[in-house]
Amino acid sequence: MIDAREPIILQFPLRGEWLSPNTPGTKIPSHGTNKFGSRYAYDFVQVDWERKGWPAYRVSLAQYLLFGVPLDQYYCWGQDVYAPCDGVIVQAADGYKERPRTKLLLDMSNAYKNAHYFDPKIDDIQSVAGNYIILKCADNVYAGFVHLQTGSIQVSVGQLVKKGNVIGRVGHSGNSFAPHLHFQLMDSLDLATANGLPFAFEQYELFKNGKWVQVNNGIPTNKDRIRFQK
């Protein structure tokens, strides 16, 4: 990371094998913007490592491009999301409907519209974030879990959670190209105005040279095959 601030250390918020196509381990800002507290945000998907291009869906590339993909054909859709630290839930917004399938051109159009025309004073933040949870980890440190599956949020505002508790499931709500977990740390609970905070994961494994090796306080790149089992 090319940044003067020391990253905060958190537990990995998922279980199993993952890829982070957008990560501060590769570029900062990781999503090309500092808006919405996303400067150091990660996206996580599950892929088929044996197929060319590491697709995140079970269908063919032609079907993805021509017809879209039903959400249940994505490997990560519905996977549990875990609290990465002890804390208190300060926001939990559910009920925002997911589109039933991905459609590349429509999803790109939505992304462009939200990136260029979203006005936090008048627009609903759920049009960008979908279903989301904000967890207060410490003073001025808030974890954001975005694009969650509709109806999956298992916590409520004011609830105390422990590191490792299940809090929701990976979804495709809001401004999302495909089912994934968007995960970030911020200095405020307000997604519309927060600044992102740098962070790393206290432990995970990296598949390297045909074997799994342990990484401590690591920041995966967008090519890393990683896993976390607890």
Image: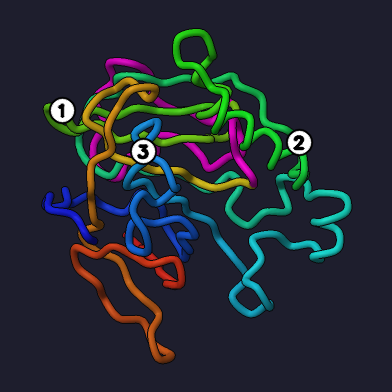
**Does the magenta run of residues contain 212?**
no
Amino acid of disc 1: Asn
Residue that carries the numbered disc 3 in the rendered image? 34
Q: Which residue is at a point 21% across and 30% down the rendered structure image?
A: 187
Q: Which residue is at a point 59% across and 30% down the rendered structure image?
A: 174
Amino acid of disc 2: Pro
Nearest the viewer among 106 and 173 is 106
Q: Label 3's element? A: loop
- Can you name the residue that lies furthest to the front here? 116
Nearest the viewer among 36 and 148 is 36
Residue that carries the numbered disc 1 in the rendered image? 140
Highlighted range, magenta: 151-177
Ranked by sequence position, the earlier of labels 3 and 2 is 3
Q: Which SS does the magenta portion mostly show?
A: loop
**Position of residue 111 measured from the top left corner of the image (x, y, whole percent):** 62, 37
**How far is the residue under mark 1 from the one under mark 3?**
17 Å
